[in-house]
Image (cartoon, grey):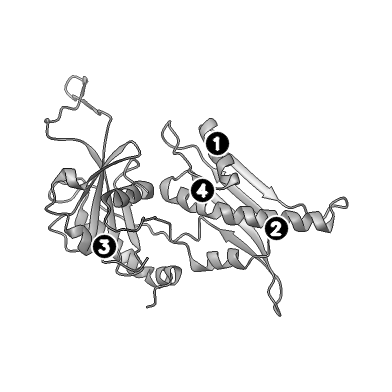
Amino acid sequence: MEHRDWGARIRQLRDVPIPQRTVESGGETLIGAVDPNQPDPHLLLAKVRKDVPQQINYDDGSFSYLQLAANQGLVDVTTVYFLSFGNVVATMGGGISAPRAQAIQRWFNGMRLTSEEIQLRPVVDARSRDKLARANAVEKLTIRVQPEAHDSPSALRSSSDIGTAISRMHEEYPDMTITLTLEVPKKPKWYSVRRRSRGHRQLLDSTSALAADIGDWLDNTDAVDVARAEAHIEEWNQQATDEKIDFVAERITAKCRVPLESTDGHSIDLHVALTELARVAHEHERTLRAAVGADV
């Protein structure tokens, strides 16, 4: 997809009635918004909460359900900042239940802002993709999935055989750490060269297929904390090398601090959030451009 000026497209939604910027998808209600006071290209994507939180009276210790006016509701909000190249976005969730990549993708496609289907993928260091593309064999693959903070685990969508197996185990054993390691044996006497070569080739194919699943998982859940492979690379007229591919560490991310409360009493200072997203995007611009093929 050629680069689009998403900021200009989204700004057109400022005066659009709420029903026309609402998408019902995946059992969720997603509402897009733009703050007219912020000049930076951004989207505020809200997910309507279905739970009813309770509040406490500190005088008598009693609990009661939070009462809202009929025209009000509770939402979890993610701030999306549009970079000026390569259709790259930076996101900052306002909480653990705020919309993540899958929800943002569903909202964009539901709004039909373009005739093409939009897919959101994590931006991975170009060197990581290059290692896997040049690999002749994979010696070892390790995936670790941790229990999630809430009782119901995130659905790990998968298109690969290994990804499907991990997803099923994560759903069936949500309170356990799941570690899956696949490794080609190190030349035991009974293990022929032919079988070793076949194992290397099969694990390479499986790792390549799983890479897309891992990218989706890392963008939509914090459960996956280990995803790495050991690859063997042989190229003509060059010495063979063994390379480690760390899908978690080589994913381009950044951390920044944003005040929980702003001076005007809102829950998150949007101006500070956008400023920080712009700052870290600028710090990683060269790496990001290389990853998406956008020349400086």
Q: What amino acid is at disc 4?
A: Asp
User: Which of label 4 and label 1 is nearer to you?
Assistant: 1
Q: Residues within 10 Å of mark 3 (few under 14, many from 20)?
A: some
**Which residue ends up furthest to the front in the rendered image?**
115
Asked if the residues shown at circle 1 and circle 3 are in contact, with their CB atoms under 8 angstroms apart, the answer is: no
N-term mark: 3 or 2: 3
N-term mark: 3 or 4: 3
Q: Residues within 10 Å of mark 1 (few under 14, many from 20)?
A: some
Q: Is residue 255 left or right of residue 178?
A: left
Residues at marks 1 and 3, CA–CA distance in whole angstroms = 37 Å
Residues at marks 2 and 4, CA–CA distance in whole angstroms = 26 Å
Q: Position of residue 198 (x, y in %)?
A: 75, 55
Q: Residues within 10 Å of mark 2 (few under 14, many from 20)?
A: some
User: Which of label 2 and label 4 is nearer to you?
Assistant: 2
Q: Nearer the viewer, residue 283 or 163?
A: 163
Q: What amino acid is at disc 3?
A: Trp
Q: Which residue is pictured at 20% across the width and 64% down the height? A: 8
Question: Which picture quadrant has residue 117?
Answer: bottom left
Q: What amino acid is at disc 1?
A: Arg
Q: What amino acid is at disc 2?
A: Arg
N-term mark: 2 or 1: 1
| Element marked by disc 2 | helix
Residues at marks 4 and 1, CA–CA distance in whole angstroms = 17 Å
User: Which of label 3 and label 4 is nearer to you?
Assistant: 3
- Which residue lies under the disc numbered 1? 168
N-term mark: 2 or 4: 2
Q: Position of residue 93 (x, y in %)?
A: 31, 49
- Which residue lies under the disc numbered 3? 6
- Which residue lies under the disc numbered 2? 201
- Which residue lies under the disc numbered 4? 225
N-term mark: 4 or 1: 1
Q: Which residue is pictured at 47% across the width and 59% down the height? A: 251
